[in-house]
Image (cartoon, rainbow, N blue to C red):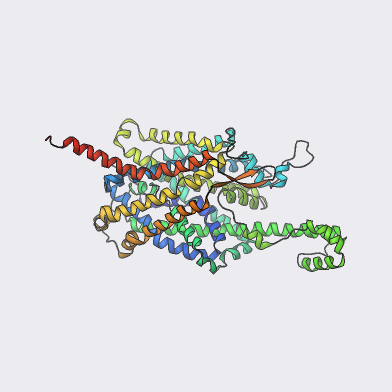
Amino acid sequence: MEKTRPLWATPLQFVFACISYAVGLGNVWRFPYLCQMYGGGSFLVPYIIMLVVEGMPLLYLELAVGQRMRQGSIGAWRTVSPYLSGVGVASVVVSFFLCMYYNVVNAWAFWYLFHSFQDPLPWSVCPLNGNRTGYIEECEKASSTQYFWYRKTLNISPSIQESGAVQWEPALCLILAWLVVYLCILRGTESTGKVVYFTALLPYCVLIIYLVRGLTLHGATNGLAYMFTPKMEQLANPKAWINAATQIFFSLGLGFGSLIAFASYNEPSNNCQKHAIIVSIINSSTSIFASIVTFSIYGFKATFNYESCLNKVILLLTNSFDLEDGFLTANNLEQVKDYLASAYPSKYSEVFPQIKNCSLETELETAVQGTGLAFIVYTEAIKNMEVSQLWSVLYFFMLLLLGIGSMLGNTAAILTPLTDSKVISSYLPKEAISGLVCLANCAIGMLFTMEAGSYWFDIFNDYAATLSLLLIVLAETVAVCYLYGLSRFESDLKAMTGRALNWYWKAMWGGVSPLLIISLFIFYLSDYIITGTLRYQAWDAAQGQLVTKDYPPHALAVIGLLVAASTMCIPLGALGTLITRRLKRGDTAPVA
């Protein structure tokens, strides 16, 4: 008899596991950036349309496959067709790549969390130079938050060629991050099921606290007005639609095999259609909710910088022209500048190069995503808040919960196929398999704690999954609809859940979603070709800013290997099955 498969204690545990996995760092640091770039409120139009035609159907497809086959990604797709085992292997390879670098973000969050208990916050002021006569030049040219991120946290090298040594402090934080993940996944669904209540719910508590604080900050309304004011012309921009589709796709975590793994621990009668709708709506609502919080803080930061700029100009003109204190204000600044330019042209021309052009709109338009938003923009806003230590602790605690919640899904995508394997599970207990996976990922992850580690992090983040996942999900959709058969899958679902499949799901699976994935795949492929030489942003300490450089040949080779390692699994898996079957057929053929 086959051993009994572990199950979630309740359907609610499964829903929380999916929410904890899907709602991640992308909701907090990618979606607000896209809103900023593609028309504020008008970006919600393509985003909601893509949720309906792409997000929900593909999420339901993966949950239904996992629940029906009751196996991890490799076993599930091998059951659909022996020629599709490569699809499952590709998912595991992509998830392994993701685990290698994703937990580094949690290591950085731990590093910032530990430093958040200091007063003042270490990124709030520039450190003094060796002579203690002024500030360190690199920090003065950049900013205190940039200096703390690039120099104190990453100790970043000038280019990807200069690898440098492993930084022991981030390395220790990475070991801690992996230890936390291991303790959470130690006993499979039994331990993960308990942890997801915290990783799914606590980030919302922090976001609500931040929303209340954000809305009371000076200038918050400027940020919210910028977010909700729609720029309707962006609806005609194809990149807005492509980015909306991409955000939905990656935010839900499609193609990694995590959702299939989670669903495989469900009761066969579980209503996975309802759960797919709930998870996708909560995920998208969280993105919008997180954007409101982010834009209120954006507004505060932009207003603070804008008013600081004005005060510097007012002080400069007051001192240069011996004006009475309090005479020059933000309201009459432009009029007085015009008067001074006409009344004292020679003196004004001397001062003019020092007068900064202060603009609130320009401050609000400064779009930042990813680690730049999390570790530079947010920290810059936090340092100017009252009781800044409290807000810093809350923020990085939230980032940790989001990151660890996603890691539970990422590791499940690797561990479920391994524990499903009778060969592996007969030799090693579940705890040992989990430990070996965490140990291997932690050891490889040390690459990202080197001085050039941040550049390798960007390579993995940009190229390890994009094309591979699109190809994997396309193969999944085609496999279910045209190899396994949509009518056969429909009858399986009806027998399993007692509910018939309506026309909406059939239309999306059979036509709309695959066409959309093909369109995205063509776009990304052509974009890489048109771009030509791939480039990256390197930190120049002398200038105190990022500069663009070309990737060296060895980095380009790694990018090629990352893409090929997962995508080639699909055709190679099918070819391997074909050869094996031919050989078996040849062995059993009668002798003439």
Residue 169 in the figure: left or right of residue 478: right
Of residue 132 and residue 83, the one placed in the foreground of this image is 83
Residue 555 in the figure: left or right of residue 427: right
Task: Please state the horizontal and vertical placement of residue 397, each as a whole percent of the image.
Answer: 55, 46
Q: Which quadrant would the N terminus be assigned to in this image? A: top left
Q: In this rendering, does residue 570 appear at all?
A: yes
Of residue 105 and residue 543, the one placed in the foreground of this image is 543
Query: Which residue occupies the extreme top position in the image?
Result: 427
Q: In this rendering, does residue 217 appear at all?
A: no
* 212, above or below 542, in the image: below
Residue 331 in the figure: left or right of residue 62: right
Task: Please state the horizontal and vertical placement of residue 189, each as a whole percent of the image.
Answer: 37, 43
Task: Please state the horizontal and vertical placement of residue 183, each as a whole percent of the image.
Answer: 45, 38
* 252, above or below 72, in the image: below
Task: Please state the horizontal and vertical placement of residue 32, each as a whole percent of the image.
Answer: 55, 57
* Occupied quadrant, residue 73: top left
* Occupied quadrant, residue 95: top left
